[in-house]
Image (spheres, rainbow, N blue to C red):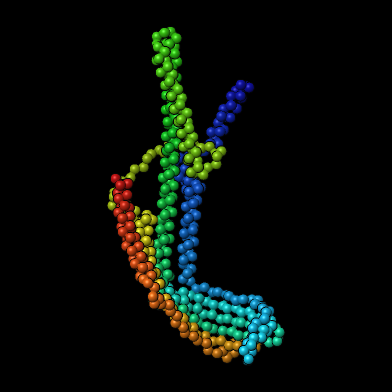
Amino acid sequence: MNKSLYVLLLCSAAWLPLRAQNVFSIEDVIQLARAQSPWSRQAETQKETSYRRYRSFRTNYNPQLRLSGNAPAYSESFIPVMQPDGTINYRSVNQANPGFNLGLEQPIFWTGGNISINSSVNYFNDISSSSEQWNGTLMNIALTQPVFAFNPLRWDKMTQPLAYEESKRSFVEQQEFISRETVDRFFNVLQQQVNLQIARYNLANNDTIYKIEQGRFNIGTTSQDKLLQVELQLLRSRQDVAQASLDLETARLRLRTYLGLRDGEEFSLTLPDAIPSFNVSVDEALQHARSNRADFIAFERRRIEARRDVAEAKGNRFQTSITASFGLNNTAGVVEDLYNDGQRLQTVNVCFNVPILDLGRNRAMMRTAEANKKLTDYVIALDEINFEQQIITQVK
């Protein structure tokens, strides 16, 4: 009875490590790699960054409500005051001058301008003379419009959605790359296991041959040279077993690192039951590649960006803008009187900056942008050819 109990406990002790060991199929390792591998987390982070960048781009077209001001604004100093006879007299000033401005801004996508509605209140208090005054803009509508200028909102509307779609396709490609790399490392471990089994089998055979040859040498039926050759083969077999063990350990470590497993977490692998087969023609592969690959979206984005750079170079030649505003303002001794009998406030301003003599600087910038566009078109055309050839080669 005691002997049977001892055997049972020994078998249980040998069975527990096997039970704690994880057994992974090829589907399991792919799922683990996509869920917790460092490469998968990096792809998720890049996807989140691209999404936040796209959301930030969308907000550039939305209205914004801004509150600005300076409060408190207090100063005590001496300021120069010119006298009627031309002399300067320094006068002590002790005053407070806070102010607030509330504005609603809306970019104009079609023209690249900006329209805003503002309301502001300013307070002045001369503490030394105990005099105070209020000044306020009850309502002011302002328009700022560049003329013949580069419109970044229009070009971002064409490039940023493509960049976001490119990032989404790139994330899918990275996930598939992780799956492919996981499969390669999965079968590499299995291959190294088979290599170790073969090396151990050869070692056992060579060990048997060596023992037989040693017995023959002892009875004088074989030469010492033959015995040494067999011994050398045995040593090589032991070396092969050691190398195969090292290769298996390295392959398991590469797979463990890629899956994000802990160092003490043991695992074993099982072969898939069947290998799926499928047929894809060249035309189908090219169609799927154009619909799913990020490179195909990148071609169009790069073309638009090249045209954008040319438009920006042309728009920077002449800098002209029109600013117009209309509103009501008032001044009063108390803040309640600001909103009674407001006076009209309107301004129109045209600002321009035209180079008279730049010694060919603007022309050189335009020619450079146009040359870069031609180069980009040629590079994209070559990339498209390489893209299709790569797909055709992989299919064949």
Left/right placement of residue 311 relative to residue 41 reads: left
**Residue sitting at 33 percent across and 45 percent down?**
278
Q: Where is residue 358 in the image (x, y as percent from the top left)?
A: 39, 73
Q: Which of 216 and 373 is in front in this view?
A: 373
Q: Which of 88 and 150 is in front in this view?
A: 88
Locate residue 300: give its quadrant. Answer: bottom left
Q: Where is residue 199 in the image (x, y as percent from the top left)?
A: 43, 27
Q: Where is residue 352 in the image (x, y as percent from the top left)?
A: 43, 79
User: Which residue extends farthest top?
Assistant: 219
**Residue sitting at 40 percent across and 11 percent down?**
223
Q: Position of residue 295 (x, y in %)?
A: 37, 55
Q: Which of 100 and 47 is in front in this view?
A: 100
**Residue sitting at 38 percent across and 56 percent down?**
294
| Residue 13 showing in the rendered view | yes
Left/right placement of residue 11 relative to residue 296 reads: right
Say if 141 sits above or below 199 in the image: below
Q: Nearer the viewer, residue 350 or 381?
A: 350
